[in-house]
Structure formats: structure tokens, C-alpha cells
Amino acid sequence: MDELKKEIVAYWDRRAPSYTDVIEKNMAGPWGKIWADYLTARFPEGAPEETRVLDIGTGPGFYAMLLAARGYRVTAVDLSEKMLAEARRNAGPLAAQIDFRRMDAQALDLPDGCFDVIVTRNLTWNLQDPVQAYGEWRRVLRTGGVLLNFDADWYGYLADEEKQRAYERDRENTRLLKMEDHQAYPDGPKMEEISRRLPMTGLQRPQWDVDTLLALGFASVTADLDAGRAVWSEEEAVNYASTPGFLIRAVK
């Protein structure tokens, strides 16, 4: 494992407990159902018990839990052992229905064509080789299988002055509205330092993703630019106003 990847894994190991706090908010009240409905409405046809789902970069297990609770056959992978430990603990009884594995999203130790659906959230911006990752994800999908990638241009403000100003307005708005600032955490400068060395920072997303997935051979690729509005709480919408969430749906 190279030094940058070690830094990334160490960062997420440290952040693992705090991300359990995040997904508890994401699942509170109606939000878990909103997320699960949004995802599964975009799945290929098939009964849940016959649909094999790969959750890449599962983190503390958000998608894995939502989908296992609906009867889907879920394999959940992450490179951070501490994130996987959080995911297993968070899943409780559902853990018996989820196959948790430590794995690199850019080099999956899985056979070709073995999944009907791949889901991932807030991962691709954090990868050293997103082209290789997208190629791997296509490889493990069956023909007609669907990739659903929720993400945002999280650190685009590091490479664009206009985005930097908009990001600073988001911070000010959280203060004015007396909301929690999701970017005010001790490890924030460390992730900014890492992000400056990652290829996604500065790319035009999601257009870059759409173009890349088509070039890799996906049959169709669409991007929902309003995905964040569909699944984010008011607090999240204020925090991330300058980095709107999008959902890429790619069919092999």
C-alpha cells in the first residue's frame, strides 16, 4: 500500500466513530425510508431476495443496513477496518444478512459479473484512481446491472476561487441559522491536504464521471443533479448548498 493510501485509510479509521453519528441522523425519522426508496426505485427489476447488491465504501454501513432490512442480498466492502467494525456493530441483528469484507474499491477481489447492483455514497472523490475503480465496478456487474453512485464535488473549492467563496458562504449560513457546521471538525485540514493530491479535486463533476463511464463501456449513463434535494435534510442542504449532491446511474 502506497503512502497516500495509508494516509487515507488512517484518516477514515480515525473518523469511523463520528460517521456512525452521521448515519444515525441519516436514518432518523423519515430519512432512512427516503434514502432507501430513492435508491431502490432505480434498481433493475427483480425480487430483493434474488438481487445481489455490492455496497462499495460502506463506511459505517448506512446503505448496507437500509438494503438488508428490505431483504436484498448485500455484500459490503471498505478498506478501513475500523469503518467495517462500526458497520458490523451498527447493523446489529442485520449483520447476519450482510457479507462484510475488507477490500480496496480500486481492486476488488471479486469475480466478474457477480452483482446486479452496485451502490456507493461519497466515495469516488476520495479515490486515487477513479478510472480504475469505475472499470472494476463495471467488471463485477452483470450485463444489465446498475451502478448507483451518490457523490458531490466535495473539495472542488480547493481548486476554484468562486467555489471557495460559495463554500465560505455555506459556513456563514450555518452560523447565522444556528445549525451544526458539518465542516468544522479537527481533522478537516488533514483531509484538505490529502484532497489536494487526489485527481477528482478540480474535475468538472459529474460530467467527468458520465464521460468516463461511457468510455469504459457502460451502455447508458445518466446523472440526477437534484439528488441531494431529494435525500438531504434542511441542515444538510444548508451545509452543502455550494456542493449539490448528484446521483449517477450507469447500466452495463
Image (spheres, rainbow, N blue to C red):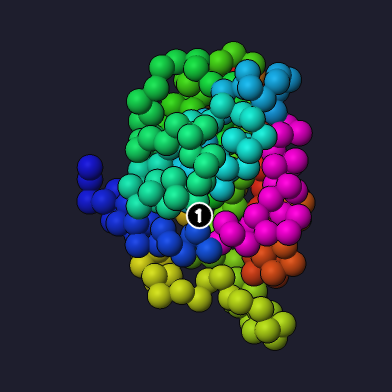
Q: Which residues are magenta?
A: 22-42
Residue 30: say if magenta: yes
Q: Is residue 185 left or right of residue 219?
A: left
**Count of numbered circles in the view:** 1
On the image, which quarter does residue 72 sit in? Answer: top right
Residue depicted at x 48% and y 43%: 58
Residue 196 seen from this side:
no
Residue 105 percent across, percent down from the top left: 41, 36
Query: Helix or strand or loop: what does disc 1 sit on?
Result: loop
Residue 177 percent across, percent down from the top left: 72, 82
Q: Amino acid at mark 1?
A: Gly
Q: Is residue 31 above or below residue 176?
A: above
Residue depicted at x 50% and y 54%: 202
Residue 32: say if magenta: yes
Residue 28 percent across, percent down from the top left: 68, 59
198 or 70: nearer the viewer:
70
Residue 89 percent across, percent down from the top left: 45, 50
Q: Label 1: how many residues lie within 10 Å, few (<14), some (14-19) or many (20+)?
A: some
Q: Is residue 216 above or below residue 82?
A: above
Residue 12 seen from this side:
yes
In the picture, which quadrant includes the C terminus?
top right
Q: Is residue 212 above or below residue 177?
A: above
Classified by dominant secondary structure, the portion drawn in magenta counts as helix
- Please name the residue that numbered disc 1 is placed on: 202
Q: Is residue 47 left or right of residue 80?
A: right
35 or 189: nearer the viewer:
35
Residue depicted at x 54% and y 21%: 115
Q: Is residue 179 above or below residue 11?
A: below
In the picture, which quadrant includes the N terminus?
top left
